[in-house]
Image (cartoon, helix red, strand yellow):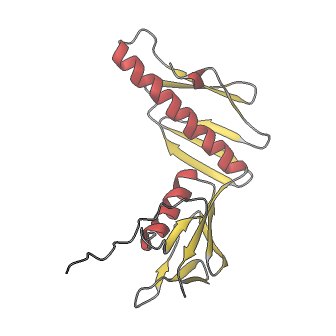
Amino acid sequence: MSKLIKKPIILPPNTKVEIKKDEIVVTGPKGTITKKFELDLVDFKIDNNQIFVSPKVDGLSKRIGRFVSKLVGTYWSILNSMVIGVNQGFSKTLQIVGLGWKANQKGESVELLVGYSHPVVFTPPKGITVKVEDPQKIVVSGIDKELVGQVAANLRKIRKPDSYKGKGIRYADEKLVLKESKKGVKGR
């Protein structure tokens, strides 16, 4: 079984959790997140500002039991991220590396000048804010961890880091392993 079955999710003050038919709604100071969950095999119990996640049915076959155990761990992690998100929020920082490459804030959207013949305009989805702190630094923030990561990945995909020079859009904490350039062949 997943070790997370024994560990409860502690709800901070001003955080409210509603368990509905097939979804869970978490409300906090920064906003509200709603996610759909398959509640047939996993049970959620709220007790004294703590949420316990456990398998619903004991005595399952060994194969299904392993699947449910993994599902409990996944649901625990998603629900914990929802609780953290509505209280603290999440953010990812991206860097632009390249001569003359930069980003400009245009209202809600970001204009990227990253070596193409035209500027690339990126508009974030609802619930996500994208800020240009300086021309080479972009910060993506929001309350939904999954959506923040996806938007940051979409921004990075506009111009992935080059494997030889390292030019491109990368995460601030990303370590690149650069390839060695090809040497000329003698005798030709």
Q: Is residue 1 or residue 144 the one in the foreground?
A: 1
Task: Note whether 11 is above or below 180 in the view shown.
Answer: above
Task: Note whether 24 is above or below 91 in the view shown.
Answer: above
Q: Is residue 120 visible?
A: yes
**1 left or right of 50 in image:** left
Q: Is residue 159 or residue 149 the one in the foreground?
A: 159
Query: Which x, y percent locates residue 90?
Result: 65, 55
Task: Note whether 53 is above or below 29 in the view shown.
Answer: above
* Residue positioned 65% across, 24% down in the render: 7
From the image, which quarter does the C terminus lie in? bottom left
Query: Which x, y percent locates residue 10?
Result: 72, 32
* Residue positioned 56% across, 75% down in the render: 96
Query: Which x, y percent locates residue 15?
Result: 73, 42
**5 left or right of 188 in image:** right
Residue extending farthest top: 59
* Residue positioned 73% across, 36% down in the render: 11
* Residue positioned 52% across, 30% down in the render: 73
